[in-house]
Image (cartoon, rainbow, N blue to C red):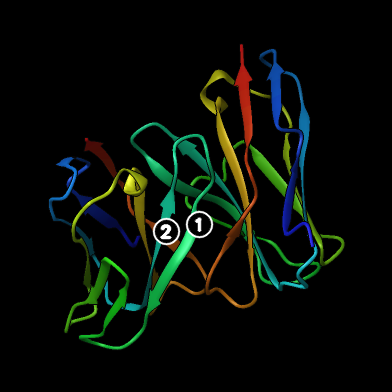
C-alpha cells in the first residue's frame, strides 16, 4: 500500500532560525496536503498542492511539491514560538481511491 | 456552526467492553473519516465513508466497525475493546477528499 514518510521526526530549532521538513511518498500523488497540530490539539489544514513543481507561500511558510509528485517540503523561515507543534503531510495517491495517507509528522520544538 | 463534534472526549474501558464513538458534522460534507493517533505513528485511517450509507476500510480496520446512516453522522464502534486500542481517535470530514476538518478528538484508554 501507499506509504508516506516524513523526516525528520523531531526538529529542535533556535528561535529566529530556518528549517525544512520533508515528505516522501512511495507512489505518485494526485495532491498533497499539510496540516499542523498544536500540542494537545487536533490537526488543522494548512495548504494543498496539486501541480507538479508547485510552490505556495503562507507568510513565513513555503510549501513545495516535487516535479515527480512523489515528494514535498515545508520550509519555515525565522521560526517563532508560535510555530511549535507537529506538522503532517498527507498524500492522496493517484491509485488510492479516496484514502488520504498521513506521514508520521515532524514535531517542532522551538528554543527561545 | 460547530464544525466537527466528537463525543465523548474521554473514556476508560475495561478489556472486552464495547462502546460507540459519535462524530457529527454540520458542514454538509460528503466524506467522513475515523483516524487513530498513537505516539510516533502519525494518523492512521481506520474506516472512511464517501457518502451516506457507504463505508470502506482504511489502513487499520480490524476490531472496529462503522456506520453512516445519516450524512451528518459517522459512528465508530468497538465490539470488544483491547488494550491495543488505547489511543486518541479523531474524526474528520471533507467535501470530496480535500481539506479535512478534524474534531477535537477522543482519548480512549482500555485497561
Residue at the location (31% across, 43% down)? A81
Relative to B38, is B106 on the left or the right? right
Q: Secondary structure at mark 1?
A: strand
Give the percent coordinates (x, y) of residue A16. Answer: 16, 50
Residue designated by label 1:
A44
Q: Which residue is mark 2?
A: A35
Question: Please, is residue A21 above or below residue B95 in the view?
Answer: above
Please rate how many residues cluster around mark 2, counting C-alpha atoms within 10 Å: few if below 14, some from 14 to 19, many from 20.
Answer: many
* Relative vertical location of residue B79 with respect to residue A107 in this rendering, above or below: above
Image quadrant in which you'd find residue B95: bottom right
The CA span between labels 1 and 2 is 5 Å
Taking the spot 61% from the left edge, 20% from the top edge, the residue there is: B109
Q: On the same chain: label 1 and label 2?
A: yes
Check if mark 1's residue and mark 2's residue have beta carbons within 8 Å: yes
Residue in the foreground of this view, choosing between A79 and A44: A79
Sooner in the amino-acid sequence: mark 1 or mark 2: 2
Eyeballing the image, is B67 above or below A26?
A: above
Amino acid at each position: 500500500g501507499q506509504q508516506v514518510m516524513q523526516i525528520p521526526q523531531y526538529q529542535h530549532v533556535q528561535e529566529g532560525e530556518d528549517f525544512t521538513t520533508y515528505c516522501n511518498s512511495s507512489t505518485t500523488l494526485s495532491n498533497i496536503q499539510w496540516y499542523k497540530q498544536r500540542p494537545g490539539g487536533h490537526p488543522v489544514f494548512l495548504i494543498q498542492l496539486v501541480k507538479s513543481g508547485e510552490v505556495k507561500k503562507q507568510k513565513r511558510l513555503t510549501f513545495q511539491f516535487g516535479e515527480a509528485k512523489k515528494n514535498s517540503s515545508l520550509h519555515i523561515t525565522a521560526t517563532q514560538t508560535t510555530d511549535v507543534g507537529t506538522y503532517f503531510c498527507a498524500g492522496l495517491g493517484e491509485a488510492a481511491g479516496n484514502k488520504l495517507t498521513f506521514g508520521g509528522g515532524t514535531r517542532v520544538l522551538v528554543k527561545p | 456552526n460547530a464544525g466537527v463534534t466528537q463525543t465523548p472526549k474521554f473514556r476508560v474501558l475495561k478489556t472486552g467492553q464495547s462502546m460507540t464513538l459519535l462524530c457529527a458534522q454540520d458542514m454538509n460534507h460528503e466524506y467522513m473519516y475515523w483516524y487513530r493517533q498513537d505516539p510516533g505513528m502519525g494518523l492512521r485511517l481506520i474506516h472512511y465513508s464517501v457518502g451516506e450509507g457507504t463505508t470502506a476500510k482504511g489502513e487499520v480496520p480490524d476490531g472496529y466497525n462503522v456506520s453512516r446512516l445519516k450524512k451528518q453522522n459517522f459512528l465508530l464502534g468497538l465490539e470488544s475493546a483491547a488494550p491495543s486500542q488505547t489511543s486518541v481517535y479523531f474524526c474528520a470530514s471533507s467535501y470530496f477528499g480535500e481539506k479535512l476538518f478534524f474534531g477535537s478528538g477522543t482519548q480512549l484508554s482500555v485497561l
